[in-house]
Structure formats: structure tokens, C-alpha cells
Amino acid sequence: MSESGNKKALVIGAGLSGLAVAARLSSLGIQVDVFEKSADFGGKAGILNQGGFIFDTGPSLFTLPDYVDEVFRYCGKNPRDYFSYTRLSTLTHYFWEDGYHLQAPSDIQLFAKRVEASGADSADAVKKFLSHSKRIHELTEKVFIRKSLHKVTNYLGRETLNGLLHFQELDTGISMEKAIRKYFKDPHIIQLFMRYATYNGSNPYKAPGTLNVIPHLEFGLGAYMPEKGIRAIPEALYALCRDLGVIFHFNSEVERIETRKSNVSGLRVNGQSISADYVVCNADIHTAYPKLLPDVQMPKANRKQEQSSSAFIFYWGMDAVFDTLDVHNIFFSRNYQQEFNSLFEDLKMDEDPTVYIHISSKVCPEHAPPGKENWFVMVNAPQHRGQDWIKIKEQLRKTILRKVGSVLNKDLAPLIVNESWTSPEDIERKTASFRGSLYGPSSNSRFAAFLRHPNFHKKYKNLYFCGGSVHPGGGIPLVMASAEIVSHLLIQD
Ligand SMILES: Cc1cc2nc3c(=O)[nH]c(=O)nc-3n(C[C@H](O)[C@H](O)[C@H](O)COP(=O)(O)OP(=O)(O)OC[C@H]3O[C@@H](n4cnc5c(N)ncnc54)[C@H](O)[C@@H]3O)c2cc1C
């Protein structure tokens, strides 16, 4: 209990989910303190200001914005008083080295027509696949995303029974790739849809066909950009927390979760014990268990889980404006299967990686000086296992400049006026994300969704977990969902 007589909760980590859970608990009348090891809030959703260019350092694609808005509404606030966003009319501009390229509008009819007109697959195939994607979403959202999968009572509702009755429609028994090949023949379109596996750091040749739900999130429900960029999301959540009275302690690394019989009694920070009625851990469980709960074994299923992929990112200030490029651009590898084998089997950077270029200054002009652009250039990378990233960086830079330069028919190196980079090792160090994974455990197995760590602890009744390493997974919407589940569990308990 706090001095005011209210219940007290301590949150470990001010990542997006830690911020959302802090706001939610505070609005329930609980006194909330957040401990963050770094000097800033937002975790992976950081910001970099370099030489007049502004970069969102982590997430760049914002889908399902209602999951963020819902946090504000739950707390009795109008989300539009904190941040706003617009829907992008073009989702992504896709390029291949064989000269084929496709600008994907968010309008499904238009996209389907464009695919057909380009001589690839039929418009009908595109529409059928996207309505299948929508169907998976309808069957899974309320069952697998918005609820704990680890409470028996949650299996008794009508929605869950409906989901289970139509289980065969979810393509759990085949890979994403195999499910996509049922609709398409053209290698470009197959590769385009397989890419959605990377939205949660997975391998389309292994992840279950259920992940073909992801295209619907973009095509059906839209890709968005907050005014002033992605950083506006953690800033809005932080402002909400402050308005609700949440207390933040930055540069405060939690050293231990303190336990007493079947409860946690609080945290140890800077050698001091702080007591609480509830603890919520937003830190990656793979670093939290050994460090914060050294006497407790992480559940076996979680110890064995394969992590999602990491990323190597260059932040380039470019002295030019590229009219052929959009906010989101992809330059595909020539051999996708080889690329995923390198990432997940050989744990090395592929020689010809797919390159993603995000240019937020196209819609947030304050992100670059006039006549210039901020290029966030990302390639999927293997988990950090001690690789020499400085050496890898030299080769990777050359590869990207050659690949993108040849497609755009431009010598890019002289246009880079400002540069920095981040490796998987940096991501691990800065956010305590196990092996630098972007999305916690991967979905590279049929039952991955059920094997994620629950949002509560089985032994310690007042210990909860939120964020990308636990159910329902990584990415902005899902980490919002985990905060929602924690607040519901806490009320139930
Ligand atoms: C390069 C990159 C690109 C991405 N792209 C996208 C995208 O386009 N779209 C999308 O939706 N998602 C994307 N993601 C994923 C998304 O960013 C994450 O899923 C999400 O931000 C994770 O939020 P989280 O709440 O799990 O917390 P995290 O961001 O993991 O933060 C956890 C916090 O806990 C703190 N912490 C850890 N241990 C301790 C301790 N002992 N004491 C105190 N504090 C501690 C850390 O410092 C950190 O601030 C991307 C991620 C990265 C890195």
C-alpha cells in the first residue's frame, strides 16, 4: 500500500507496453512507479537527431492505431488531445533487381488491378487471398490477441468456440509460403506476400499459414503515420502517464524482483528495496529471469523458443529527394529462401539481403532539411551471437549501395551527408532485448502462439508480464494488447 492508502504497482521498463500498462493501472486508482534503466522512455521506439535529420530509430510502420487509442479511452482521455495520425495512401513501393517494380496502394481494388496489369497474377487471386487474410483476422483477433491464452476460462466464450470450430481455415498445418502458393504463381507476388513474416521477425518458410493474417492489417485496415513520426506514440503515452500521476525513475536499472513465499514483495533498485502490491515486468523475459529472478527457472517452453530476427540499420541523411521512392520501400533479395536460411540456420548476414528504406521526411517534412531526405535503411539480421558487427558493417554498406544504386540507377555514396548505424548488439545493449531480437520469440513453429510466456507468473500471484517477449507478441499493436491483458488480469485477480 502507498502512503495515500492506494495499492502500489512497480513497472520494470518504460517501453511502449510499460508506458501503456502504467497508464492503465494508474487510471484504476493504483499508485504507479516506473523504473527505466536508460535515460529516456520508449525502449525500442527511440529517436535520433543528427545534423538536422530526425530518425525514428525503431518501429517505422504503424498499423492498428486503435490499439494505442484504446489506452487513452480506457484512462478517460481523448487520444486526439495527445497525438494524431493519417492513413497512408501508398503502403510500400517494391523493387526487384530484374526491373519489375510495384507500388502497392492501400486500396485493394486498385492494388489487384495493378498486379494484373503488370502481367503478374490475376486481380481475382489478389482479392481472394486478401479476403482469406481478413477471415483469419476475424477468427483470431478476439481469441488469440486480446485475451490471455493461459487462462482456462478464456476458452469458454462464444468467440473462442467459433475460432476453434473454424481452426482448419487458419492454415496452422502449412507454412505461410505454402499457403501463399495456393493463390499465386508469379515469384514477385509470392515474395511480396511472404515478406509479411518479417513483420514479427519470422521465417515465411517455417511460420504457420495463420500469419497470412498480416497483409489484411495493412491492406484492409491501413498503414498510418503519426504527425511528427512514430516517436509521437511513446511521447503521447508518456504525457498520458504524467497527467495520471505516474512517477518515472530514469537511469534506474532494476536489480532484483524480491519475493516472499508465493508473492513478490517489490523490487531492488540501486541497492534499495521498494515494496509494492504488484510488479509488472516490461523487460524481455530472457534477460529478466536470469537477472531479476535468479532463483526461479524460466518455463522450459520459453527457454527453448527461437528468437525473432534482429536488424542492422543505417541512418543516412541524403542530399537529394527521390521522387520514385515512397515512405516505405523494399528492394528484394534474389533468393529469399537462401536469405532466411542465412538468418535463422547459419546465423549470418546474407550476401544479398532484402533492403528496407523508410523515408519519414516524405510525410514529416521537419525530419529533414529542405531538398534532403532521412533514409532509415534496414536489413534483417541474425540474432547477436558475438559476430564482429564492425567488419560486417563495411561489407553490408557496399552491398546496399550497389543493390539500391543499381535499381535507382544512381551513385548513392556521394549523397550521404550524415551517417550512423545500429547493430543487433546495440539493440541488445540499449533495450536489454535478448540477442537483439526485434519482436521477442519468433513464430517459426506451428504452436508458437501458445508457447509464448503468459502475462502472469504461475507461482508469484502478483507478478505480471507485458511487452514483445510475452503473449501475444512483438510489434506496436501487440505490445499494447499485452498491457490491456495485464490490466484485465490484475482486476480479475
Ligand atoms: C529496428 C526495429 C524496427 C521495428 N519495426 C517495427 C515496425 O515497423 N512496426 C512495429 O509495430 N514494431 C516494430 N518493431 C518492434 C517494436 O518496436 C517492439 O515490439 C516494441 O517497441 C517493444 O515494446 P516493449 O514494450 O516490449 O518494450 P521495449 O521497447 O523492449 O522496452 C523495454 C524497456 O525495458 C527497459 N529495461 C530492461 N531491463 C530493465 C531493468 N532491469 N531495469 C529497468 N529497465 C529495464 C529497457 O531499457 C527498455 O526501455 C521494431 C523494433 C526495432 C528494434
Image (cartoon, rainbow, N blue to C red):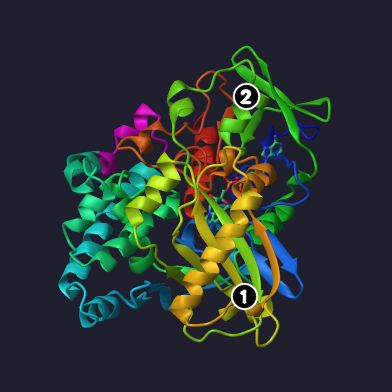
Residue 5 within the magenta-colored segment of the rendering: no
> Could you tell me residue 145's position as x and y percent?
40, 45
> Could you tell me residue 346's position as x and y percent?
44, 41
Going from N to C along the chain, the mark reached first, 2 or 1, is 2
Query: Which amino acid, by three-letter code, is at mark 1?
Result: Ala
Residue farthest toward the top in the current orientation of the protein: 261
> Could you tell me residue 368's position as x and y percent?
68, 78
> Could you tell me residue 249's position as x and y percent?
79, 43
Q: Is residue 370 left or right of residue 249?
A: left
* Residue occupied by mark 1: 413
Figure check: 375 above or below 340: below
Residue 36: quarter of image: top right
State how far apart marks 2 and 1 are (Cα): 44 Å
Query: Which amino acid, by three-letter code, is at mark 2?
Result: Pro
Mark 1 beta carbon near ligand 1 (under 8 Å): no
Residue 248: quarter of image: top right
Residue toward you, 291 or 79: 291
Residue toward you, 336 or 191: 336
Q: Is residue 343 left or right of residue 238?
A: left
In this view of the protein, can residue 27 be seen by the observer? no
**Residue located at (18% from left, 40% from top):** 165
* Residue occupied by mark 2: 290
Q: Is residue 33 left or right of residue 302?
A: right
**Residue located at (31% from left, 43% from top):** 206
The magenta-colored residue range is 146-160
